[in-house]
Amino acid sequence: MAKIYSIKIQNFRGIQNFEYVFKDAGFICLIGRGDSGKSTILEAISMVLSPSWNISFYDTDFYNCNIDAPISIEVVVYNPPGKLLLENKLGLSARAIHPDTYELISYIHQLEAGVDPLLALTIKLEVKKDLEPKWFVVNHINSEQIPISANDRASMNVFLVSDYVDRHFSWNRGNPLFSILKQRADGDAEGDQESVVLEAMRSAKTLIDRESFAELQEIIAQIKTKAQSFGTIIRDAKTSIDFKDIAIKDGRICLHDGAIPLRMKGKGSKSLVSTAIQFSLIQDGGIILIDEIEQGLEPDRIQNFVTLLKQHTDSQIFITTHSRDVVVELNATDTFRLPPTRNTLVRFDESQQGTIRKNPEALFAAKIIVCEGATEVGIMRAFDSFLRDQDGYGLSYYEVRCADGTGSELVNYCKSFRKAGYDVCLFCDSDDRGVNAQKDALRELDITIADCDDGLCIEKQMFKDLSWAKISDLVNYGLSIKYDSIHSNVAVCGGDMTNPDWFNEGTENIRTILGNASVYKTHKQDKSWFKRVDHGQKLGEIICTDFENPVVSKIYAQLNTIRGWLLL
C-alpha cells in the first residue's frame, strides 16, 4: 500500500522551509516543543493527499501571512495504487526507489539489471495568493505538472485523527463510516450506499410518526387556530421530523453508545474509536495521522494503544506526542525530533535507546542539563526556585529539563542528547578520572561543562567553598537526617563531632574532614549523607541563600556557568 518516502514543505503556517526523507520508516513519532510545527507536518500530509476536491485556505495559512510566497507541499509516495501507474494515467511520471537502499532514482533504467524497483509518484499541492489549492503530479523529466484528481488522491487512504473527529461517527457521504459501507456494497454506485442509510432514516421517521405527542397537541391546536384566523388552512397539524432535516449530508444518523452519541465521549475514547474506524476502512493498508495521541488517555491505555498500532505493519503511521508513556513504548528508530530550526527532523538510532528509556521527559525540552547524580538533580531544583524568585523565570521558561546521568552514564547521555540536536550542559564532579579524560571531547561537541575543582565531588566542593555559617547549616541538616553516620563518618575521617570545640574551629582541615565524611563509603555500604534528590534540593537551598555573596568560589562559578548557558 502507499507510503510516504519524503516530504517538502514551504511557506505553510509556522514552517518556512522543511524537508525530510523517511525512506522505509513505517512508524513515525514526532516529538518537539509545543508550537514547534509537529501538527503542521501532519496537516500538510493530510492536505497534499486530501480526498477533498477543495480545501479552504486563508492568509494566515501562509508563513508570516506573506501571501506573495506560495504555499508548496510536496510528497513522494511509493507503492501507490496500481491504477495510478498506468501509462494513460500517471505512470509516465513515476520514479524509482531502490528496494534495498531506498535511494530515489529519477530514471528507472539507471537501476542495475534484475532489480525490481519500488515505483513512486511526486504529488504537489500549491496555493497562491488567490487561495485556490491546486494538486499536481510533478514530472521529474521536465517541468510538466499533471493535475491529480480528488478520487485519485483518495485512493492513497490517508486519514487524520485530531481534535475534529466528531464527523467520523456519522453516516453521511464523505465520512469514513460511509466509505466502509461503500466498500461492502455490491457495485460502485453511490446511490446504492445512500439508499441503505436513507431507508434506515425513513424507517425511523415512520416509527416517530406513530407517536401522538399529546403533550404538544394543545400548543399545536392554539397555533392552528391562530394561523387559520390569518387565512391559512391547516387540516392535520402534527409534530414530526422534516425530511430535509434527515438529509444524508447533515449527518444526523450517527454512532451511539447506548443512548449517548459517541461525539459526546471523552477525547481519548473518541480518538480510539475514530482510529478503529480508519483501520476498518484501510484493511489493505493506508496512511494514518494521529495528532497528540495521548489526549484524554490514561498511561495504560496510551501504552496499549501504541503497542497495537505498532502491529499494523501494512500501514504507515504518523503520530505526535508530548507523553513519556508513548516514547518509552517505541523503538528509538521510531522517534523523530523536530528541532527549533523546523527545517528537518532528527531521527534517533538504536544506540540512543537507553537514553530514551532512562530520560523520556527530557526529550520534550529544547535544552538539557545532564546532572551527574541525584544530588545534582536536587540542587538544580533549588536553583530553579532561586531563578524564579530572582528573575521571575525558571528553567521551564528557558525550555530546560534536567536528566539524571546516574554517574556512570553521564558522558553517554551527553553525547546522545547532543547527537539528537539538543543544547546540552553537564553539571558534574571532577573526581572521576575516566570522566575527566572525556571532558575536552564533550566541549568539542559544544557541550557546556559546569564542574568542580579537580579531584572534588559536589559535596567536597561545598564544604571547601561555603561560608562557615552555611557549613553549619549543612552539618545540622545532616544531623537531622543521618545523626549516627554523621558522627561515625567524621570519626573515621579523623574528626570528633562529640567535641564542640573541634567543630567550632572552622579550619581548612576540618572542612576537608567534613567533605570526606559526607561521601564516605565502604566496599559493603554507602554511608554518604546527601545522595538523594530531596537532600540535594536542601543543599541547593543552602547554597542559593548565599548566591550573591561576593566571595569567589567554584560552587558559585558552576551555577553562574549554568546561568550563562541558559541565557544563550
Image: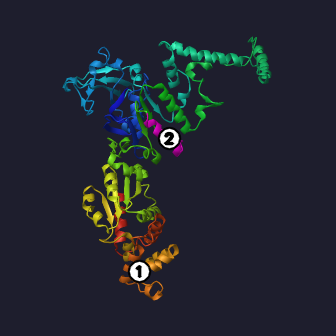
Residue placed most toward the observer, 216 or 344: 344
**Crowd band around label 1 with a 10 angstrom C-alpha radius: few (<14), some (14–19), many (20+):** few
Q: Which of the image's four quarters has the N terminus?
A: top left
Disc 1 is placed on an element classified as helix
Q: Amino acid at mark 2?
A: Asn
Location of residue 448 (image quadrant): bottom left
Say if residue 542 shows up in the picture.
yes
The label shown at residue 492 is 1
Magenta segment, prevailing SS (helix, strand or loop): helix
Residue 2 drawn at (x, y percent) = 37, 27
Residue placed most toward the observer, 138 or 207: 207
**Crowd band around label 2 with a 10 angstrom C-alpha radius: few (<14), some (14–19), many (20+):** few
Location of residue 67 (image quadrant): top left
Q: Residue at x 52, y 20 (%)?
A: 181
Q: Earlier in the sequence, mark 1 or mark 2?
A: 2
Q: Which of the image's four quarters has the C terminus?
A: bottom left
Residue 2 vs 299, above or below: the answer is: above
Disc 2 is placed on an element classified as helix
Residue placed most toward the observer, 79 or 426: 79
Residue 221 vs 160, above or below: the answer is: above
The answer to if 221 sits in the magenta stretch is no
Reading the image, the residue beneath label 2 is: 304
Q: Amino acid at mark 1?
A: Val
Instruction: Give the total number of marks visible in the rendering.
Output: 2
Residue 466 vs 255, above or below: the answer is: below
Say if residue 243 shows up in the picture.
no
Q: Give the extent of the magenta segment.
A: 294-311
